[in-house]
Image (cartoon, rainbow, N blue to C red):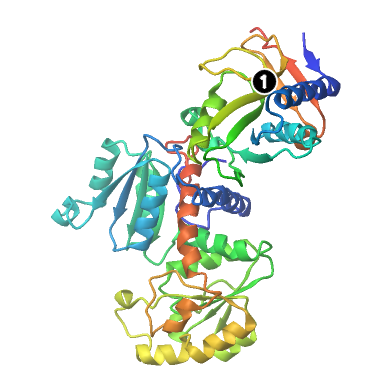
Amino acid sequence: MEKSLTAHELAFGVECLARAIRDKHRGHPIALIGIRSRGDEVAERILTILSEEDDWDLSFGVLDISLYRDDFEHLHTNPLLQESEIGFPVDGAHIILVDDVLFTGRTIRAALDALSDYGRPAKVELAVLIDRGHREMPIQPDYVGIALDTSRLDHVLVSLEGADGQDLVQIIPKKMP
Amino acid sequence: MARKDLLDIASLEREEIECLLDQSIPFKELFTRSVKKVPALKGKSVLMLFYEPSTRTHSSFEVAAKRLSADVTNFDVAQSSISKGESVRETVETLQAMRTDYIIVRHGRSGLPGMIARQTKASVINAGDGAHAHPTQALLDAFTIREKFPETTGKKVLIIGDILHSRVARSTSMILKKLGVDVAYLGPGSLVPKNGPENIRRFTDYKEAMAWSPDVIYLLRVQMERQDAQYFPSLREYHKLYGINDARLEEIRKRGLYLMHPGPVNRGVELCDAVMDYERSLINDQVENGIAVRMAVLYWLKPGSENPDII
């Protein structure tokens, strides 16, 4: 059976992430870096909530990890590249990586590699809107918006307003042959 | 769509060209980072097979491949078995056995890169073949023009020089036409092909060409090594008729035109020393963009892919 998350539930997830980050780091400079595509949109929403605080030094960036993927061999065409936009010095920064879904952990592995080519951050944390489990790498999030119980073969399709026109998450079970 | 080879501009669709040019932007952005290298082609091998001398194109491809973390091998023609009489076909069979993933070829004979492409699973990139094509030069030229004019349709580019022998002129004017740019040629009657594309204007007089009011002036290199016959009286005469001297540069500056040249320049022939300091000269941009565009090409091609190009 197909399950889904509504726009309301997603907004609540973003709110949880923002609150947890605020409670831990209020007043200390941090940089949110969203992973393309859709991680950047989640990061932007968190930024909007955090920006309500006065006098908080917040930076924002976007990372494209296509060139750091480990599955080139298996792809028929290489993923379309987009620009990374990191307009602040990564050296010594306190960075929170933001993505929409955490699954195998391979994207985050690639993002950490990409980030280290920009400089040496003082600290890197990980915030994900949805943690669906089934890690293939020793990577755990520091902040989770929504924890989802899925089977490894399920498809978790995230749509966000900016990229797809609406906020919606569908969990589509793999059909048995 | 994935392709195996890049042999010329003629076989590319406008959408593919625009996609490749868009894809070059993130690669150029990498050059501003402290680490300019990315692991995308880690473990892949790139073989440089240059039968003709080249400094710029060769080093540009080498830098591009290395920034993608590929391993680069130079098949040094002067020291190789080719000078011992090995045929191109035998060389390619040897390379096939080495399981190289990308072969970058320059050869004096038109069509030779295509012939190699049909015989190997490796991706073949044409780095210039005879007077036929030089697709990566065309892509970097188009990229450089698009950086200045995001909307290329209706812009005017005047190509000056030895059009007849120039694969750069051929490939670059073809890509510009595909992007909706208006192209014109200026050069001695003996060096401008009479039966070429219909929609390209031909000028023999500098003043007339400038009256056409181009946005970009593209100077070709006078290829002294490629001319067995005399096509114009002397280099001094060429400079007088078509070279950018101080007075012409002043007019170009007043009009705010961009200047391009594929390099290496012959000072005192196509242009005078002062051109090198001209603030709207894009010659150095072309060099930098060449690396980004070649990285995008290497990233885009798929060695051994199932739908190889039919040439």
**Tag 1's secondary structure?**
strand
Residue lying farthest right?
A8
Q: Between residue A163 and residue B302, name the one nearer to us.
A: A163
- Crowding at label 1, few (<14), some or many (≥20) Cα neighbours within 10 Å? many
Q: The residue under label 1 is which amino acid type?
A: Tyr
Residue at the image position 48 percent from the left and 85 percent from the top: B244
Q: Between residue A133 and residue A172, name the one nearer to us.
A: A133
Could you tell whether A14 is left or right of A69 in the image?
right
Q: Where does the image place residue A37, in percent across and percent down from the top left? A: 66, 34
Q: Where does the image place residue A43, in percent across and percent down from the top left? A: 70, 33
Residue at the image position 52 percent from the left and 91 percent from the top: B247
Residue at the image position 63 percent from the left and 39 percent from the top: A62
Residue at the image position 41 percent from the left and 75 percent from the top: B221
Is B235 drawn above or below residue B293 in the view shown? below
Could you tell whether A16 is left or right of B77 in the image?
right
Q: Quadrant of the N terminus of chain B?
A: top right
Residue lying farthest left?
B84
Quadrant in which residue B210 is drawn: bottom right
Is B266 drawn above or below residue B239 in the view shown? above
Q: Which residue is identified by label 1?
A: A143
Q: Where does the image place residue A147, in percent across and percent down from the top left? A: 71, 13
Does residue B205 appear in this view? no
Does residue A143 appear in this view? yes
Is A98 drawn above or below residue A131 in the view shown? below
Q: Where does the image place residue B146, in percent across and percent down from the top left? A: 61, 62
